[in-house]
Image (cartoon, rainbow, N blue to C red):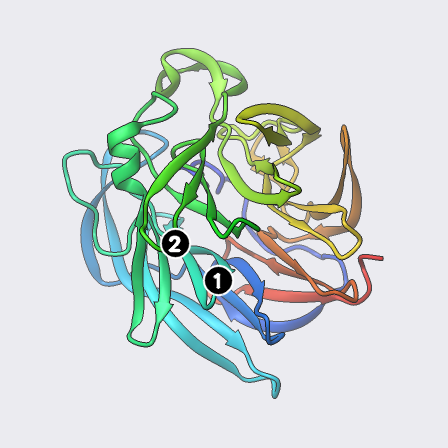
Protein backbone atom coordinates (compact mmCIF):
# COMPACT_ATOMS: atom_id res chain seq x y z
CA UNK A 1 0.00 0.00 0.00
CA UNK A 2 3.01 2.27 -0.41
CA UNK A 3 6.36 2.49 1.36
CA UNK A 4 5.87 5.69 3.32
CA UNK A 5 6.04 4.07 6.76
CA UNK A 6 7.58 0.71 5.82
CA UNK A 7 9.82 -0.38 8.68
CA UNK A 8 9.19 2.71 10.75
CA UNK A 9 7.31 1.04 13.58
CA UNK A 10 10.17 -0.35 15.64
CA UNK A 11 9.68 1.94 18.60
CA UNK A 12 6.20 3.16 19.48
CA UNK A 13 4.53 4.71 22.48
CA UNK A 14 3.62 8.01 24.05
CA UNK A 15 6.15 10.40 25.52
CA UNK A 16 6.18 13.62 27.49
CA UNK A 17 5.88 16.26 24.77
CA UNK A 18 5.79 19.97 24.15
CA UNK A 19 2.85 21.73 25.75
CA UNK A 20 0.35 22.21 22.98
CA UNK A 21 -3.38 22.66 23.59
CA UNK A 22 -5.41 19.69 22.29
CA UNK A 23 -8.16 20.85 19.93
CA UNK A 24 -9.07 17.42 18.47
CA UNK A 25 -8.47 14.06 20.14
CA UNK A 26 -9.35 10.39 19.57
CA UNK A 27 -7.94 10.15 16.02
CA UNK A 28 -6.59 7.06 14.27
CA UNK A 29 -3.44 7.96 12.37
CA UNK A 30 -3.95 11.66 11.59
CA UNK A 31 -2.04 12.56 8.41
CA UNK A 32 -3.13 15.96 7.10
CA UNK A 33 -4.54 19.35 8.12
CA UNK A 34 -6.15 22.17 6.16
CA UNK A 35 -7.80 25.48 6.93
CA UNK A 36 -10.58 26.04 4.39
CA UNK A 37 -11.30 29.54 3.03
CA UNK A 38 -14.06 29.95 5.64
CA UNK A 39 -11.51 29.34 8.43
CA UNK A 40 -12.74 25.92 9.50
CA UNK A 41 -10.12 23.26 10.21
CA UNK A 42 -10.16 19.91 8.41
CA UNK A 43 -8.16 16.83 9.43
CA UNK A 44 -7.76 13.50 7.65
CA UNK A 45 -6.89 10.20 9.34
CA UNK A 46 -5.57 6.91 7.94
CA UNK A 47 -8.06 4.79 9.86
CA UNK A 48 -7.77 1.23 11.15
CA UNK A 49 -8.46 -0.95 8.11
CA UNK A 50 -11.60 -3.06 8.39
CA UNK A 51 -13.14 -6.52 8.34
CA UNK A 52 -12.58 -7.41 4.68
CA UNK A 53 -9.44 -9.44 4.00
CA UNK A 54 -7.51 -8.53 0.85
CA UNK A 55 -4.15 -9.59 -0.55
CA UNK A 56 -1.46 -6.93 -0.37
CA UNK A 57 2.28 -6.66 -0.88
CA UNK A 58 4.47 -5.59 2.02
CA UNK A 59 6.45 -2.65 0.54
CA UNK A 60 9.45 -3.40 2.74
CA UNK A 61 9.83 -7.12 1.97
CA UNK A 62 7.92 -7.54 -1.29
CA UNK A 63 6.07 -10.49 0.24
CA UNK A 64 2.36 -11.06 -0.21
CA UNK A 65 0.39 -10.62 3.01
CA UNK A 66 -3.23 -10.56 4.07
CA UNK A 67 -4.45 -7.08 4.89
CA UNK A 68 -7.70 -5.81 6.41
CA UNK A 69 -9.72 -3.26 4.48
CA UNK A 70 -12.68 -1.05 5.39
CA UNK A 71 -13.99 2.49 5.01
CA UNK A 72 -12.46 3.77 8.24
CA UNK A 73 -10.25 6.53 6.83
CA UNK A 74 -12.11 9.78 7.52
CA UNK A 75 -12.03 13.46 6.70
CA UNK A 76 -13.30 15.45 9.68
CA UNK A 77 -14.16 19.13 10.15
CA UNK A 78 -13.91 21.11 13.38
CA UNK A 79 -16.99 23.30 13.78
CA UNK A 80 -16.96 26.69 15.54
CA UNK A 81 -18.77 25.18 18.55
CA UNK A 82 -16.04 22.55 18.95
CA UNK A 83 -18.05 19.69 17.45
CA UNK A 84 -16.29 17.31 15.07
CA UNK A 85 -18.23 16.67 11.87
CA UNK A 86 -17.50 13.72 9.56
CA UNK A 87 -17.20 14.99 5.98
CA UNK A 88 -16.21 11.88 4.01
CA UNK A 89 -14.91 8.33 4.29
CA UNK A 90 -12.17 6.66 2.28
CA UNK A 91 -10.78 3.11 2.15
CA UNK A 92 -8.28 2.15 4.82
CA UNK A 93 -5.97 -0.86 4.51
CA UNK A 94 -4.06 -2.22 7.50
CA UNK A 95 -1.59 -5.06 7.98
CA UNK A 96 0.41 -5.47 11.14
CA UNK A 97 1.19 -2.04 12.55
CA UNK A 98 0.98 -0.35 9.17
CA UNK A 99 -2.06 1.27 7.60
CA UNK A 100 -2.83 3.43 4.60
CA UNK A 101 -5.78 5.61 3.75
CA UNK A 102 -6.52 9.19 2.80
CA UNK A 103 -3.46 11.34 3.41
CA UNK A 104 -3.56 15.05 2.62
CA UNK A 105 -6.01 17.83 1.82
CA UNK A 106 -6.18 20.87 -0.46
CA UNK A 107 -8.88 23.32 -1.49
CA UNK A 108 -9.88 24.12 -5.06
CA UNK A 109 -13.52 25.22 -5.08
CA UNK A 110 -14.01 22.36 -2.64
CA UNK A 111 -12.05 19.67 -0.86
CA UNK A 112 -9.36 17.61 -2.65
CA UNK A 113 -7.85 14.51 -1.03
CA UNK A 114 -4.96 12.13 -1.79
CA UNK A 115 -6.11 8.59 -1.09
CA UNK A 116 -4.43 5.24 -0.64
CA UNK A 117 -1.63 3.50 -2.49
CA UNK A 118 -1.10 0.55 -4.80
CA UNK A 119 1.80 -1.67 -5.89
CA UNK A 120 0.29 -4.83 -7.40
CA UNK A 121 0.96 -4.74 -11.15
CA UNK A 122 -1.17 -7.80 -11.89
CA UNK A 123 -4.26 -6.64 -9.98
CA UNK A 124 -6.39 -3.57 -10.58
CA UNK A 125 -6.59 -1.27 -7.56
CA UNK A 126 -9.65 -1.13 -5.39
CA UNK A 127 -11.82 1.99 -5.75
CA UNK A 128 -10.28 5.25 -4.52
CA UNK A 129 -6.82 3.75 -4.09
CA UNK A 130 -3.80 5.70 -5.40
CA UNK A 131 -5.92 8.62 -6.59
CA UNK A 132 -6.56 12.29 -6.12
CA UNK A 133 -10.23 12.59 -5.18
CA UNK A 134 -12.76 15.36 -4.80
CA UNK A 135 -15.35 15.34 -2.01
CA UNK A 136 -18.61 16.02 -3.82
CA UNK A 137 -22.27 16.12 -2.73
CA UNK A 138 -22.52 12.34 -3.16
CA UNK A 139 -19.21 11.61 -1.45
CA UNK A 140 -15.66 11.10 -2.77
CA UNK A 141 -15.12 10.86 -6.51
CA UNK A 142 -11.92 10.23 -8.45
CA UNK A 143 -10.21 13.22 -10.08
CA UNK A 144 -6.96 11.57 -11.24
CA UNK A 145 -5.62 8.00 -11.28
CA UNK A 146 -1.98 8.11 -10.20
CA UNK A 147 -1.59 4.34 -10.27
CA UNK A 148 -2.45 4.32 -13.98
CA UNK A 149 0.27 6.94 -14.55
CA UNK A 150 2.81 4.97 -12.51
CA UNK A 151 2.00 1.73 -14.32
CA UNK A 152 2.30 3.38 -17.74
CA UNK A 153 5.30 5.66 -17.07
CA UNK A 154 7.19 4.41 -13.97
CA UNK A 155 9.22 7.64 -13.88
CA UNK A 156 11.91 6.51 -11.41
CA UNK A 157 12.43 3.21 -13.27
CA UNK A 158 12.19 0.97 -10.21
CA UNK A 159 9.38 -1.28 -8.98
CA UNK A 160 5.82 -0.10 -9.60
CA UNK A 161 4.49 1.69 -6.54
CA UNK A 162 2.17 4.68 -6.22
CA UNK A 163 1.29 6.38 -2.95
CA UNK A 164 -0.07 9.88 -3.59
CA UNK A 165 0.62 11.80 -0.40
CA UNK A 166 1.50 15.51 -0.44
CA UNK A 167 -1.00 17.82 -2.13
CA UNK A 168 -1.20 21.50 -3.02
CA UNK A 169 -2.82 23.82 -5.56
CA UNK A 170 -0.55 26.06 -7.59
CA UNK A 171 -1.25 29.61 -8.68
CA UNK A 172 -1.62 28.23 -12.22
CA UNK A 173 -4.71 26.25 -11.18
CA UNK A 174 -3.03 22.86 -11.44
CA UNK A 175 -2.85 20.41 -8.55
CA UNK A 176 0.60 19.18 -7.51
CA UNK A 177 1.14 15.82 -5.80
CA UNK A 178 4.17 14.22 -4.21
CA UNK A 179 3.92 10.50 -4.91
CA UNK A 180 5.78 8.88 -2.02
CA UNK A 181 5.75 5.47 -3.72
CA UNK A 182 6.79 6.61 -7.19
CA UNK A 183 9.42 9.08 -5.87
CA UNK A 184 8.02 11.77 -8.12
CA UNK A 185 6.40 15.19 -8.20
CA UNK A 186 3.32 15.14 -10.44
CA UNK A 187 1.02 17.76 -11.94
CA UNK A 188 -2.71 17.00 -12.17
CA UNK A 189 -5.20 18.85 -14.35
CA UNK A 190 -8.23 19.04 -12.01
CA UNK A 191 -10.64 19.40 -14.96
CA UNK A 192 -9.47 16.45 -17.07
CA UNK A 193 -7.56 14.27 -14.61
CA UNK A 194 -4.50 14.27 -16.87
CA UNK A 195 -1.24 13.58 -15.00
CA UNK A 196 2.14 14.97 -16.02
CA UNK A 197 5.60 14.41 -14.54
CA UNK A 198 7.31 17.47 -13.05
CA UNK A 199 10.37 15.77 -11.54
CA UNK A 200 11.72 12.53 -10.15
CA UNK A 201 13.94 12.34 -7.08
CA UNK A 202 17.21 10.46 -6.87
CA UNK A 203 17.97 7.91 -4.18
CA UNK A 204 19.62 8.99 -0.93
CA UNK A 205 22.91 7.47 0.26
CA UNK A 206 22.18 4.31 2.27
CA UNK A 207 24.14 1.89 4.43
CA UNK A 208 23.58 -1.26 2.34
CA UNK A 209 22.81 -2.50 -1.15
CA UNK A 210 19.10 -2.04 -1.82
CA UNK A 211 17.59 -4.74 -4.08
CA UNK A 212 14.58 -2.50 -4.68
CA UNK A 213 16.93 0.04 -6.29
CA UNK A 214 18.93 -2.33 -8.48
CA UNK A 215 21.45 -3.12 -5.75
CA UNK A 216 22.55 0.49 -5.35
CA UNK A 217 23.63 1.55 -1.86
CA UNK A 218 20.63 3.87 -1.61
CA UNK A 219 17.43 4.59 0.29
CA UNK A 220 14.27 5.75 -1.46
CA UNK A 221 13.83 9.54 -1.24
CA UNK A 222 10.06 9.30 -0.42
CA UNK A 223 8.73 12.82 -1.17
CA UNK A 224 6.06 13.83 1.34
CA UNK A 225 4.97 17.43 0.73
CA UNK A 226 5.25 20.25 -1.77
CA UNK A 227 5.05 24.06 -1.55
CA UNK A 228 4.99 26.29 -4.63
CA UNK A 229 6.55 29.77 -4.33
CA UNK A 230 7.05 32.05 -7.33
CA UNK A 231 6.99 29.12 -9.72
CA UNK A 232 9.58 27.15 -7.72
CA UNK A 233 8.67 23.88 -5.99
CA UNK A 234 10.00 22.99 -2.54
CA UNK A 235 9.65 19.32 -1.63
CA UNK A 236 10.29 17.54 1.69
CA UNK A 237 11.88 14.09 1.58
CA UNK A 238 11.21 11.56 4.35
CA UNK A 239 13.92 9.10 3.25
CA UNK A 240 13.20 5.38 3.14
CA UNK A 241 14.26 2.70 5.61
CA UNK A 242 16.39 2.50 7.68
CA UNK A 243 15.57 6.23 8.13
CA UNK A 244 19.10 7.36 8.89
CA UNK A 245 19.51 10.35 11.18
CA UNK A 246 20.19 13.44 9.07
CA UNK A 247 19.27 11.79 5.75
CA UNK A 248 16.08 13.79 5.12
CA UNK A 249 16.06 17.16 3.38
CA UNK A 250 14.10 19.77 1.49
CA UNK A 251 14.90 20.02 -2.20
CA UNK A 252 14.11 22.71 -4.76
CA UNK A 253 12.67 21.95 -8.19
CA UNK A 254 13.17 24.74 -10.70
CA UNK A 255 12.85 24.31 -14.45
CA UNK A 256 12.65 20.55 -13.95
CA UNK A 257 16.03 20.46 -12.17
CA UNK A 258 16.30 19.20 -8.59
CA UNK A 259 18.79 20.69 -6.13
CA UNK A 260 19.25 20.64 -2.36
CA UNK A 261 17.73 23.53 -0.44
CA UNK A 262 18.15 22.43 3.20
CA UNK A 263 19.81 19.20 4.34
CA UNK A 264 20.56 17.34 7.56
CA UNK A 265 17.07 16.64 8.92
CA UNK A 266 15.44 13.31 9.82
CA UNK A 267 12.11 11.86 8.59
CA UNK A 268 10.40 14.96 7.18
CA UNK A 269 6.66 14.44 6.77
CA UNK A 270 5.23 17.86 5.90
CA UNK A 271 6.17 21.26 4.53
CA UNK A 272 4.10 24.48 4.65
CA UNK A 273 4.63 28.17 4.08
CA UNK A 274 3.99 30.42 7.08
CA UNK A 275 2.46 33.90 7.11
CA UNK A 276 6.01 35.27 7.39
CA UNK A 277 6.90 33.75 4.02
CA UNK A 278 9.22 31.19 5.63
CA UNK A 279 8.96 27.43 5.09
CA UNK A 280 8.13 25.15 8.03
CA UNK A 281 8.68 21.39 8.09
CA UNK A 282 7.61 18.52 10.34
CA UNK A 283 10.16 16.07 11.71
CA UNK A 284 8.38 12.81 12.53
CA UNK A 285 11.15 11.71 14.90
CA UNK A 286 14.86 11.42 15.36
CA UNK A 287 16.10 7.87 14.86
CA UNK A 288 18.43 5.48 16.66
CA UNK A 289 19.49 1.86 16.38
CA UNK A 290 15.93 0.67 17.01
CA UNK A 291 14.20 3.15 14.73
CA UNK A 292 12.17 6.31 15.43
CA UNK A 293 12.55 7.58 19.01
CA UNK A 294 9.32 8.59 20.82
CA UNK A 295 8.97 12.23 21.77
CA UNK A 296 11.61 13.57 19.36
CA UNK A 297 9.30 14.98 16.69
CA UNK A 298 9.44 18.69 15.93
CA UNK A 299 8.31 21.58 13.79
CA UNK A 300 11.31 23.12 12.06
CA UNK A 301 11.87 26.44 10.33
CA UNK A 302 13.58 25.79 7.00
CA UNK A 303 16.51 28.02 6.14
CA UNK A 304 18.66 27.77 3.00
CA UNK A 305 21.11 25.05 3.98
CA UNK A 306 19.55 23.92 7.26
CA UNK A 307 16.82 23.93 9.89
CA UNK A 308 15.88 25.66 13.16
CA UNK A 309 13.66 24.11 15.84
CA UNK A 310 10.37 25.94 16.48
CA UNK A 311 8.54 23.35 18.60
CA UNK A 312 10.28 20.22 19.92
CA UNK A 313 9.37 17.11 21.92
CA UNK A 314 6.37 16.06 19.83
CA UNK A 315 5.09 12.44 19.70
CA UNK A 316 5.22 11.31 16.06
CA UNK A 317 3.84 14.44 14.34
CA UNK A 318 2.86 14.15 10.68
CA UNK A 319 1.34 17.44 9.47
CA UNK A 320 0.94 21.11 10.26
CA UNK A 321 -1.25 24.09 9.41
CA UNK A 322 -0.50 27.73 10.23
CA UNK A 323 -3.01 30.55 10.67
CA UNK A 324 -2.39 34.10 9.37
CA UNK A 325 -1.81 35.19 12.98
CA UNK A 326 0.95 32.59 13.46
CA UNK A 327 -0.91 29.94 15.46
CA UNK A 328 0.51 26.50 14.73
CA UNK A 329 -1.65 23.36 14.51
CA UNK A 330 0.09 19.97 14.46
CA UNK A 331 -1.17 16.39 14.13
CA UNK A 332 0.52 14.11 16.67
CA UNK A 333 0.66 10.34 17.16
CA UNK A 334 0.32 9.75 13.45
CA UNK A 335 1.24 6.20 14.39
CA UNK A 336 0.38 4.63 17.71
CA UNK A 337 -2.47 3.08 19.64
CA UNK A 338 -6.00 3.44 18.22
CA UNK A 339 -7.53 6.72 19.32
CA UNK A 340 -4.19 8.23 20.41
CA UNK A 341 -3.98 10.65 17.48
CA UNK A 342 -4.70 14.33 18.10
CA UNK A 343 -4.37 17.88 16.82
CA UNK A 344 -2.49 20.30 19.07
CA UNK A 345 -2.44 24.09 18.90
CA UNK A 346 0.60 26.25 19.70
CA UNK A 347 -0.58 29.84 19.91
CA UNK A 348 1.69 32.42 18.28
CA UNK A 349 4.45 29.90 17.56
CA UNK A 350 5.21 31.42 14.17
CA UNK A 351 6.04 35.13 14.27
Query: Where residue 67 sits: x, y (%)?
Result: 25, 49
Q: Quick one: which residue is furthest to the front in this view?
A: 172
Mark carried by residue 190: 2
Is disc 1 surrounded by few (<14), some (14 to 19) or many (20+) residues within 10 Å?
some
Work out which quarter of the rendered image holds the C terminus and state it: bottom right
Q: Which x, y percent locates residue 53? A: 19, 54
Residue 208 percent across, percent down from the top left? 48, 14
Q: Quadrant of residue 35?
A: bottom right
Q: Nearer the viewer, residue 285 or 106?
A: 106
- Residue at numbered disc 1: 108
Relative to 288, say whether 309 is above or below. below
Q: In screen coordinates, is 9 left or right of 1? A: right
- State the residue lying farthest toward the right: 351
Residue positioned 39% across, 48% down in the render: 189
User: In terms of secondary structure, where does tag 2 sit?
Assistant: loop
Residue nearer the viewer, 112 or 66: 112
Q: How many marks?
A: 2
**In whole angstroms, how far apart are the C-alphas of marks 2 and 1?**
9 Å
* Location of residue 307 by image quarter: top right
Which residue is painted at 33% across and 63% down in the image?
90
**In the picture provided, is 187 more to the left or to the right than 346?**
left
Q: Is residue 62 visible in the rendered structure shown here?
A: no
Left or right: where 112 falls relative to 269 = left
CB-based contact (under 8 Å), mark 2 and mark 1: yes
Work out whether mark 2 precedes mark 1 in sequence or the reverse, and give the earlier one.
1
Give whichever of 237, 228 is nearer the camera: 228
Q: Quadrant of the N terminus?
A: top left
Helix, strand or loop status at disc 1: loop
Q: Residues within 10 Å of mark 2 (few under 14, many from 20)?
A: many
Whether residue 331 is visible here, answered yes or no, is yes
Q: Which mark is residue 169?
A: none
Amino acid sequence: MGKLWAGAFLVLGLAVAAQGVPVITGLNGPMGLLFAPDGRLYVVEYGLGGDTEVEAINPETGEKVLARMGATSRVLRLEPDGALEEVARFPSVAFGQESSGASRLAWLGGLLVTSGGWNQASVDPMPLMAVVARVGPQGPEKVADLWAFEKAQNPDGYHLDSHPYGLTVGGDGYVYVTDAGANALLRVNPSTGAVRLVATFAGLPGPFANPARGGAQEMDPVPTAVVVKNGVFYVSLLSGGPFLKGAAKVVKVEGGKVSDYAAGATMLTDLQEGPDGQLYAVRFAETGERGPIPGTGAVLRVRPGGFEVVVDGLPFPTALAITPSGDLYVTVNGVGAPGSGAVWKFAGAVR
